[in-house]
Every structure is written in C-alpha cells, then in structure tokens.
Amino acid sequence: MLTKQQTVRTALLEALPLALAIAAYGLSYGVLATQAHWSLWSTILMSLLVFSGSVQLVIVAMFISGAALPSMLITAVLLNLRNLLYGAALADNLAPASRKYRWLLAFGVSDESFVLGNIRYQKYGADPLYFGVVAGTFYSAWVVASYIGAYLGDLIDPVRWGLDLAFPITFVALLIPALTHKPIIATAITALGMASLLHHMMPNSEFNLILTGIIAPLVGLYIARRSHHG
C-alpha cells in the first residue's frame, strides 16, 4: 500500500504533463478575454469560480459576438452537464473522503481529472487523496496561466504559438491508453463521429461541443448498463 507521500508524489508526476497543456490553454483564455476587453480581475475571477476551459472560452466567444446573458448561462450549464456523469462515475473513488472534503473534490471534477482519477481507481481502488492532488494541480495551473495570459494580453498570439493545440493533443495522448473497455471505446467513437458530422453540418457552432458532450457519454453509459446486466 502506498504511503501518503508516495501518493502525492505520484499524483504530481502524473498530473504535470497535462497541467502544462492546461496552462497553455489557460494562456489562450486569458489573452482572448483581454481582447474581449474584460478586466484583469474579471478574467481571473471567472477562472477561480468556474474552472472550466471549454465553458470559459465559449463564453468569451459568445460575449464577443454579442450574445445575451441568458444564452451564455444556458450554454454554460449545458456544457457542464457531462460533469454530472463524471461525478457519478467517480463516486466510489471519492467515497472514503469525508463529506466536507467531497464537496471540495467535486469542484475539481473535469475532463482531465476524471481520466487520471478513473485510471488510478481501476489500478489501486478508491484514492481521494490522489484525485485531490491532481485536481489541485490542474486548478493552480489554470488560474495562474489565466492570469499570465490576461496580464500579457496582446503580446501573445495563441494560434501563432500553437497554444490552442497543446491541450487537445496532450489530452488525446492521455486518453488513448484508457480505451480498454467497451463503454469507453463507444463513448470515444460516438464523440468522434458526432463532432465530425456536426462540424460538417454546422461549422464553428458552439452547439457542436454541447451536443457531443451530452450524447457521447450517454451512449457510453448505455453500453455499460447493457454489459452489466448481460
């Protein structure tokens, strides 16, 4: 059984590569928010309270396009609905933590922490400490990078430096080894197919990500239930 120090060290080492990619993504968000004429502190406050790269980037884009506040709020809720599925899947992993700490860990649920937490759970069983360190590392990287991006503003061009590609490339590299079970494979294939089809039908629409993020995990859950009852 690993000691707490070993768990923390392992979590930091395994989270670091993805944290760097998240930081690159955070820089992009900070720069874009500044270009949308958001103040430095409003940009940072959103990262502190929301902690969702996809939501924050989409909201900035909608703000620039002149979308109404209700539309932005509805979009944010829809984009984060997948976190309910993540939370349900991580429930057993976080169960040993006390109730007050579970609320804090729930705030750290994201695409990246879910993948690492789920892989850890499959290998070693429930480990809320590992998940907490991973989530805290990602949160710190996101907030600090958002600040740097907002502070530097127009001095950085995310597209020119390839910062917009750093996160998806790293995340895909992390996700591939996890494709070992039918529900996960079904989710990935559905997401790929839906994203490609919707992009062809509705290029550059923010609803592509929303629909894919909702339907693909539901397909995975359906396959999982069929496998369980079968």
Image (cartoon, rainbow, N blue to C red):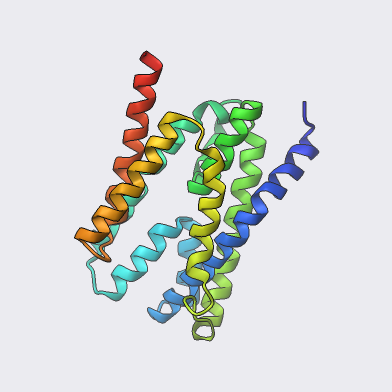
User: In the depicted view, which residue is nearer to us: 190 or 125?
Assistant: 190
User: Can you give x and y, in whole percent of width and height, for residue 208 in the image?
Assistant: 27, 56
Q: Is residue 37 left or right of residue 111?
A: left
Residue 60: tell me if it is visible. Answer: yes
Residue 190 percent across, percent down from the top left? 33, 42
Residue at the top extreme, as displayed: 230
Q: Position of residue 213 (x, y in %)?
A: 34, 47
| Residue at position x 43%, y 30% in the image | 182
Instruction: Tell me which residue sits at (67%, 47%) in the image.
Output: 14
Reply above or below: 133 against 67.
above
Q: Quarter of the image containing the C terminus?
A: top left
**Quadrant showing the N terminus:** top right
Residue 207 in the figure: left or right of residue 83? left
Q: Nearer the viewer, residue 195 or 34?
A: 195
| Residue for point 51% across, 67% down | 44
Q: 73 left or right of 114?
A: left
The number of callouts visible is 0
In this view of the protein, which residue sits in the foreground, 22 or 166?
166
State the image coordinates of residue 156 (x, y, percent, origin top left).
Answer: 53, 81
Residue furthest bottom as drawn: 155
Determine the residue positioned at 66% across, 37% down.
129
Tell me the quarter of the picture where residue 34 sits.
bottom left
User: Residue pushed farthest left?
Assistant: 201
Q: Is residue 97 visible?
A: no
